[in-house]
Amino acid sequence: MDLRVNCSRPLCIGIARRGVGRKGQMKIQQMAFVLVALAIFFALVLIFYLSVRVSNLKDSAVGLKDEETREIVKKIGQSAEFVYTQSDCSGCVDLDKVLILKDRNVYKDFWGFDYLKLEIIEGKDGECNKFNYPNCKTISLVNSTKDFGSVVSGFAPFCYWESEKGGYTRCVLGRIYASGKGIGK
Amino acid sequence: MVKKKGFEMSFGLNKKGFEMSFGLNKKGFEMSFAWLFSIIVGAVIIFLAIYATTKLVVTEKTVQNTETAKEFGILLNPVETGLEESKLATVSFPVETVILNDCSTSGDFGRQGISATSKSNFKADSAGVESGFKNKYIFSENSVDGKDFEIFSKPFKMPFKTADVVFLIGNKKYCFVSPSTDIEEDIRALKFTGIKTADKVSECDKDSEKVCFEFSDRECDTEVYSLSKSVKKSGKTEYYDDEFDNSLLWGAIFASPEIYECQVQRLMKRTGEISLVYLGKTEYLTAKGCSSNLEEGLNGLEDATKKFKNSFDLRAVSPIASELERRNNGLTCKLF
C-alpha cells in the first residue's frame, strides 16, 4: 500500500492535501463532536443521578435522625441521669438531677442532640436555676445551635423534692423537647 | 510500512482522508482513522462507564450498610429496660448480616461503634460507615453474624442504675452447663432460642459454645467461677461483680475479652459522672432540709472509678458502692 501523502510523520492528521482529505477530516470532526457530545450527555446524566441520590440520601439521613431522636425521647426518662429512683415510677424524670445535669458540660454531647429542653407544663415563666427552681418553666440542657431543625417532644411526669409540709416528693406534668444532631448542609 | 513475518501494517492518506491497514500480506483489510478513533474513544467511554458503575455499586452498598447499622442502633433503644429486670427482643434482617462491635474508651464516656455488612459480601473493609453512640453498651463478640439476632438488656447498677447493657446473640448457639440459679432463672424467664442448658458437657451440641459453671473441662469454651467472680475465656480471665445485678456476668460470657474490658471501663466512667450528679443533688437537697450525708461515699466512688484500669479493679469499686447503698437505704429522704 502506498503512502498517498508525502508526510514526515506517520499520523499526519492535520495535513490535508487540498481537495483530497477535506471530506475525511470533516467526518473525523463530526465523530469527535458526537463523542464529545456523548461524553457530556453521560456526565450530565451522572450529575443528575448523583443530585437525586444525594437528595434521597439526605432525606433518609434526616428520617433516621428524627427516628433516633423519637426513640431516645421515649426512653430518656428511664436513663440513669434522668430516672427518678426513689420510688417505682417508670419513666418519671428526677427534676433535681436534671437541674444539676444542666451545669455538667460533659453531657452536652452525650445523647447526640443539638437541642434538649424540659418544660414544666404549669410552671412559671423563665429558665430554671438554683435560685428560682422549682418555680420556673424550662431547663435547657443542650442548645448547641440556633438552626437545630425539627423538634420531637414527649410528655413525662417530672418529680422533685418539695421541702414544704415536712418534705415530700411532688410530681408534675412536663414535656421533653429534643432535636437530633444536624447532618450538615 | 512495517513488514515482519508476512504481517503488514501501513498508515496513509487517501482521497477519503486518513487510512490504516494491517493484515497478512495481500489479504489485509483497511481501517480508516474514523474507525480507529471511534474504537479508542469508545473503549475509553466503556471503561469509564464500567468504572463509574462499579464505584456506584460499592457506594450504594456502603450506604445500605451504613443505614443498616444506624437502624440497628436505633432499634436498641426500645430494648432498654425501665423497671424491668431484663428484656428480650429479636431483630431480623432480610439477609445474613454481620454486625461489627467496636468499643473505645476515649473521651468522657467512651464510644460504642456499630457497623454492618451483608454476610455474602463480608470483607473487613466492606462494612458501611460506623455509627457511634455514647450511651450504649453492647456486649458481644467483635463480629456477630446471623439473620435473626436475639438482643436482651439488663440494667447495670453500681449501686444506682448506671446504664442498660445490651447483649447480642446471632447464629451462635450457647450451651450452659450446670448454670447458677439466677442465670437459669433468666434463661427460663426470657425464653432464649439460642441458649440451652445441660447438666454435662457431653449433652451439649458439638457446634455450640460451651459455658461451664464452677468447673473446667477440655471441651469448655468459657468457664465461670462464682467464688473468684471470674470468667475464663480465650485464655484470658475477666472479672465481674454481681453484688447489685448479674449483668456483668452475662457480659463476660457473651463478649470477647477486649470488648468486655472496654465496656466495663466505659460503665465505670459513667458511674463516676453519675456520682457527681448525685453529689450535686445531695448538696442542693441538704440546703432544702433533705440531708443524706453521702457526699464522702459519692466522692469515694467517683475516685475509685477514676482509678479503674481493668475489670479486676471492680473489687475496689464494689465495696464502696455497697456501703453507699447500705447508707442510702437507711435514709428517710433517699438520694437514689
Image (tube, rainbow, N blue to C red):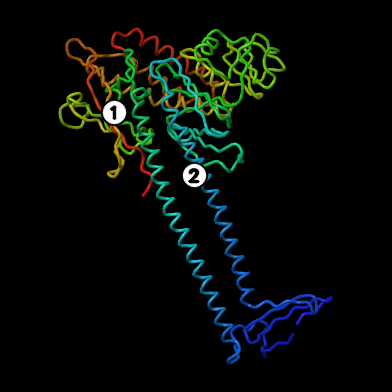
- Percent from the top left, x then y, of residue B78? 41, 25
Q: Residues within 10 Å of mark 2 (few under 14, many from 20)?
A: some
Above or below B49: residue A66:
above
- Would you say the residues marked 1 and 2 are in contact, meaning their CB atoms lie under 8 Å apart? no
A27 up-or-down from A71: above or below:
below
Query: What amino acid is labelled 1 in the image?
Result: Gly
Give A77 or B108, whichever is nearer the viewer: A77
Disc 2: host chain: B
Question: Do marks 1 and 2 both belong to one polypeptide chain?
Answer: no
Instruction: Please state the horizontal and vertical placement of residue A106, each as a whole percent of the image.
Output: 37, 33
Task: Tell me the quarter of the image containing the C terminus of chain B.
Answer: top left
**Mark pair 1, 2: CA separation:** 31 Å
Left or right of residue A148, residue B110 in this image: right
The residue lying toward the viewer, choosing from A159 and B319, is: A159
Quarter of the figure that contains the N terminus of chain B: bottom right
Q: Quadrant of residue B10?
A: bottom right
Q: Please provide percent x and percent y for residue A57.
A: 42, 46
Mark 1 falls on what kind of element? strand
Q: Residue A26's image quarter?
A: bottom right
- Disc 2 on helix, strand or loop? helix
Q: Give the left or right position of residue B49, taking residue B8 as reference.
A: left
Is residue A155 shown left or right of residue B239?
Answer: left
Residue placed under numbered mark 1 in the picture: A154
The image shows residue B114, relative to residue A93, as above or below, that is below
| Point 64% across, 14% down: residue | B212
Left or right of residue B18: residue B293: left
Residue at image mark 2 = B63
What count of labels does the image hold? Answer: 2
Residue shown at 60%/91% (left/top)? A17
Q: Which chain letter goes with mark 1?
A: A
- The amino acid type found where label 2 is placed reads Val
Occupied quadrant, residue B172:
top right
